[in-house]
């Protein structure tokens, strides 16, 4: 049996960030890029450990094939960057936005690149920054690709975050009773997680930390992205669907369960069984070399054959890393192969208006010959019928 990784609670080392940068530069060479410009705060965090909010003052990370990364920032944030960022950075600041002619961010920015370079830009870059970017612009997903395979350090951080959400979910199931309001569940479960984060990582960056815990009661559990009313009440029976997610000092994970309070309604038994078996089918295919679209196709085919094809509304899984939703994707149309050190969710779902939603989700590490579930929560029907007497 493969052992679970060791939880890590410390910031990345300079060597960890240097390795990430090396991987980015290798792909830049493959794509014949002289520069890569990062606007997305997620990618900037990945390469520098610096977290911030996007506002009218741009932050731009400008990567050449060698030498320090240039970080174009507002003067207001200079001390913040010095305190939080890790690695070899050449900080270039502009005074304010807007600024007098000659001192605007874009006037400084254009001098850092020049007119004739091949410049990689992220697909999500704003149009304003794109238009101000000089050179031959090439849209590229380099950072998304580099982030897919996790280092041992990242796996340790993700495992620690998984322990946090597992603890939060355990609290959620303990307090969830018929008549309890959504807000009470959110308050107690998120408080449990936040307290544990502070205990484990006293200097956690709360610009890269958040916790969420909620339960979709039976009358809305067929709408997985509907935000519940804070005064929504839990009900006897089910299906209820829990969602417990966190970004723990920069690393995103989740654990979700379909569960029942007191008893399971007869009409919920078959869709729960089909969801549970579809999930097992996906797990049975998890190993390096398997094409991710094939997993989703097989799972969808099974659910369709069981009569629930009209109630499939999303893919089988997605990736985790420094966010809770990123590549890779276990989805039709995503034909890449699983590789060791990917981290994904497994969450085939069935959603039936008038009956409810059926979905379990875990954060799962792909290993050299299979997988490890990093999150922990009840799974079988017997274990997800909660005693409320």
Image (cartoon, grey):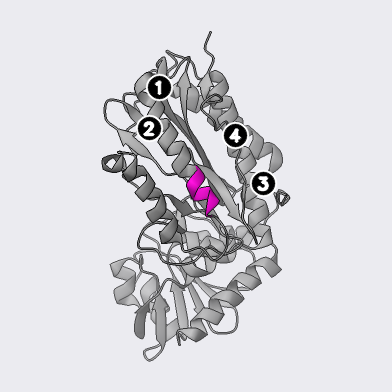
Image-based side of 319 in relation to 119, left or right: right
Q: In this view of the protein, which residue sits in the foreground, 168 or 137?
A: 168
Residue plotted at (49% across, 49% down): 282
Look at discs 3 and 1 and give the one toward the viewer.
1
> Looking at the image, do the residues carrying marks 4 and 3 touch, with CB atoms under 8 Å apart?
no
Secondary structure beneath label 3: loop
Q: In this view of the protein, which residue sits in the foreground, 210 or 189?
A: 189
Q: Earlier in the sequence, mark 2 or mark 4?
A: 4
How far apart are the two marked residues, 3 and 1, measured between alpha carbons? 40 Å
In the rendered image, which residue does mark 2 sit on?
Answer: 271
In the rendered image, which residue does mark 1 sit on?
Answer: 238
Q: In this view of the protein, which residue sits in the foreground, 236 or 226?
A: 236
Q: Position of residue 235 (x, y in %)?
A: 40, 16
How far apart are the two marked residues, 1 and 2, measured between alpha carbons? 12 Å
Q: Earlier in the sequence, mark 3 or mark 2?
A: 3
How far apart are the two marked residues, 4 and 3, measured between alpha carbons? 15 Å
How far apart are the two marked residues, 3 and 2, measured between alpha carbons? 44 Å
Look at discs 3 and 2 and give the one toward the viewer.
2
Q: Position of residue 113 (x, y in %)?
A: 43, 84
Part of the protein shown in magenta: 280-285
Say if the magenta span includes residue 281: yes
Residue plotted at (54% across, 60% down): 45
> Looking at the image, do the residues carrying marks 1 and 4 touch, with CB atoms under 8 Å apart?
no
In the rendered image, which residue does mark 3 sit on?
Answer: 203
Residue plotted at (45% across, 67% down): 336
Secondary structure beneath label 2: helix
Q: Residues within 10 Å of mark 3 (few under 14, many from 20)?
A: few
> Looking at the image, do the residues carrying marks 3 and 2 touch, with CB atoms under 8 Å apart?
no
Q: Earlier in the sequence, mark 4 or mark 3?
A: 4
Say if the magenta span includes residue 293: no
The answer to whether residue 223 of the structure is visible from this angle is: no
């Amino acid at each position: 049996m493969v052992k679970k990784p060791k939880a890590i609670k410390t910031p990345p080392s300079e060597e960890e960030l240097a390795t990430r940068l090396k991987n980015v530069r290798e792909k830049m060479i493959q794509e014949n890029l002289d520069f890569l410009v990062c606007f997305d705060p997620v990618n900037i965090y990945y390469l520098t450990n610096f977290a911030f909010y996007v506002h009218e003052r741009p932050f731009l990370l400008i990567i050449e094939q060698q030498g320090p990364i240039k970080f174009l920032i507002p003067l207001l944030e200079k001390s913040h960057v010095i305190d939080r960022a890790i690695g070899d950075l050449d900080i270039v600041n502009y005074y304010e936005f807007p600024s007098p002619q000659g001192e605007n961010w874009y006037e400084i920015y254009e001098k850092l690149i020049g007119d004739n370079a091949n410049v990689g830009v992220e697909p999500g870059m704003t149009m304003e920054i794109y238009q101000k970017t000089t050179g031959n612009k090439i849209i590229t997903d380099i950072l998304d690709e580099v982030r897919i395979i996790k280092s041992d350090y990242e796996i340790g951080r993700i495992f620690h975050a998984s322990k946090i959400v597992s603890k939060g979910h355990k609290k959620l199931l303990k307090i969830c009773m018929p008549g309890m309001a959504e807000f009470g569940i959110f308050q107690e479960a998120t408080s449990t997680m936040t307290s544990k984060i502070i205990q484990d990582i006293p200097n956690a960056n709360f610009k890269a930390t958040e916790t969420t815990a909620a339960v979709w009661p039976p009358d809305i559990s067929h709408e997985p992205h509907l935000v519940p009313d804070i005064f929504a009440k839990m009900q006897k029976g089910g299906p209820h669907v829990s969602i417990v997610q966190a970004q723990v000092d920069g690393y995103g994970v989740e654990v979700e369960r379909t569960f029942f309070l007191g008893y399971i309604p007869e009409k919920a038994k078959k869709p729960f069984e089909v969801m549970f078996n579809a999930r097992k089918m996906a797990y049975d295919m998890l190993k390096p070399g398997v094409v991710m679209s094939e997993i989703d196709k097989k799972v969808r085919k099974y659910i369709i054959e069981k009569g629930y094809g009209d109630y499939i509304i999303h893919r089988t899984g997605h990736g985790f890393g420094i966010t809770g939703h990123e590549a890779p994707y276990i989805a039709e149309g995503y034909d890449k192969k699983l590789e060791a050190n990917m981290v994904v969710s497994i969450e085939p779902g069935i959603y039936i208006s008038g009956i409810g939603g059926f979905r379990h989700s875990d954060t799962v590490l792909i290993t050299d010959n299979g997988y490890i579930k990093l999150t922990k929560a009840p799974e079988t029907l017997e274990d997800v019928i909660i005693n409320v007497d």
